[in-house]
Image: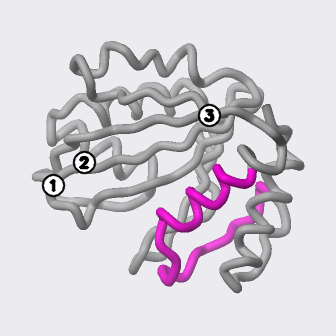
Amino acid sequence: MPYPSEILREVNGCLMDLNKPRAGSLAHIYQTDGEVSCVNLAGAILERFAGDMGENYEYVNATSDNGLVCNIDAIATNGRLIHINVRGEPSTNNHVFNVHIWDNTALIIQVYLNKQVRLFRRISKYNFIQEFNRLRSQNSHYVSGAYNDLFGVTIAPNYTVSDLNVTYV
């Protein structure tokens, strides 16, 4: 389970690999430029932790059995790095991001293609759990609200989540 200093080191390594400026700290207000795909950054971060630190993946499909098999409360433990892949229709709203849990805080680490977003979004762990559950509710009204609260991106209320995959180290 990574410490915040390890998160910053690996995120900065990924940013450098993508020819983007480094973040000064996890509290740094770093506005992304919309040129990097969320799949590229989030996947690279997960690979660094799985490879560099010898961590093993754990994988859960949060939409199988109506999401009952995914207990995000149990997954979102202190020091955990969580990688989430949200897919649905329309596909332009699909998103992949990472979350680091530390001291009851969820640090969302993201970029978004063709949109400027904050690289680091800090919310309480409990709000993250609530918004994650709204995201997987498959109620389009709840999904669009959760999307905005988690990512700072406004989407049309017609987005339906068909697949929500959670990988964690």
> Which amino acid, mark 2?
Ser
- The quarter of the image holding the C terminus is top right
Separation (CA) of disc 2 from disc 3:
29 Å
Residue drawn at x 67%, y 53% as measured from the top left: 47
Q: Is residue 87 left or right of residue 53?
A: left
- When asked about the image quadrant of residue 110, the answer is bottom right
- Report the mark closest to the observer, 1 or 3: 3
> Which amino acid, mark 3?
Tyr
Which residue position is annotated with label 2? Answer: 144
Label 3: element kind: loop
Q: Between residues 79 and 156, which one lies in front from this camera angle?
A: 79
Separation (CA) of disc 1 from disc 3:
27 Å
What's the coloring here?
one colour
Q: Between residues 112 and 85, which one lies in front from this camera angle?
A: 85
- Bin the neighbour count of mark 1 within 10 Å (Cα to Cα): few under 14, some 14-19, many 20 and up: few
- When asked about the image quadrant of residue 153, the answer is bottom left
Q: Between residues 86 and 61, which one lies in front from this camera angle?
A: 61
Residue drawn at x 35%, y 27% as measured from the top left: 62
Residue 29, x across and y down, in percent? 69, 66
- The quarter of the image holding the N terminus is top right
Are the two marked residues, 1 and 3, in contact with CB atoms closer than 8 angstroms?
A: no
Label 2: element kind: helix
First in sequence, mark 2 or 3: give its number: 3
Q: Residue furthest left?
A: 158
Residue range of the region highlighted in magenta in the rendering: 26-48
- When asked about the image quadrant of residue 118, the answer is bottom right
Residue 81, x across and y down, in percent? 67, 38
Separation (CA) of disc 2 from disc 1:
12 Å
Circle number at residue 57 = 3
Which residue position is annotated with label 1? Answer: 89
Whether residue 8 is in magenta: the answer is no
Residue drawn at x 28%, y 29% as measured from the top left: 63
